[in-house]
Amino acid sequence: MELQRSSVGPVPDFRALYTSKAPLVWRTLKRLGVREADLEDVAQEVFVVVHRRLPEFEGRSSIDTWLYGICLRIASDFRKKAHVKRETDLAEAPERSHSGETATRQIAMRQARLKLDEALNELDEDKRAVFVLFELEQLSMQEVAETVGAPVQTAYARLYAARKHIEAFVNQQRQVSA
């Protein structure tokens, strides 16, 4: 399933890479602020870049770190296209369930994800990227710093600031609902 590269090592097979990493790319783009309605197009754009640049992958970092870097750039570019008018989607009804407890849990989880998305949307791009990669995707701080192109200490400072913002957001939401 892998093509051999002479001096650097094996090049991952695109189909296998797409099959195994599409959920990761999708999830990462969503967490980086790409709207649900645009995810399919943006994910496709990521994999176009992956297909084009796969022969250049040197293996100096993990394939996941390389993909996160591509996702960061594509999501950032996409969000900067302010001139593109996007439609607003309505909240979908939760899936039907036979158990009221299961439906309640699904609704609570969906609401929690929406609140997290709201909090993430308020962060600047640098802090958001570090928070998503470290806290949600669980990359090491070294990998995060490498992916965002910042020194490790800078990445830690961004994470600290993002955590403070998320905590303040959660506290504000608690006060509003109390």
Image (cartoon, rainbow, N blue to C red):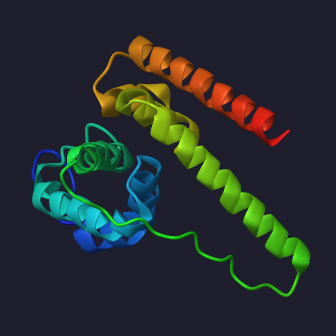
Please state if 139 lies on the left or on the right of 99 as rendered. Answer: left
Please state if 36 lies on the left or on the right of 3 as rendered. Answer: right
Please state if 156 lies on the left or on the right of 105 as rendered. Answer: left
Quarter of the C terminus within the rendering: top right
Please state if 41 lies on the left or on the right of 156 as rendered. Answer: left
The answer to which of 16 and 131 lies nearer the viewer is 131
Residue 48 position within the rendered picture, expressed as x and y whole percent measured from the top left: 17, 64
Residue 126, by quadrant, is top left
Residue 69 position within the rendered picture, expressed as x and y whole percent measured from the top left: 29, 42
- In this view, 159 is above or below 64: above
Please indicate, yes or no, whether residue 43 appears anywhere in the rendered image.
yes
Q: Which residue occupies 66% across, 25% down?
A: 168
Q: Which residue occupies 35% across, 43% down?
A: 65
Residue 86, by quadrant, is bottom left
- In this view, 67 is above or below 171: below
Q: How many marks?
A: 0
Quarter of the N terminus within the rendering: bottom left
Q: Which residue occupies 50% across, 33% down?
A: 131
- In this view, 32 is above or below 47: above
The answer to which of 39 and 145 lies nearer the viewer is 39
Residue 159 position within the rendered picture, expressed as x and y whole percent measured from the top left: 51, 23
Residue 16, by quadrant, is bottom left
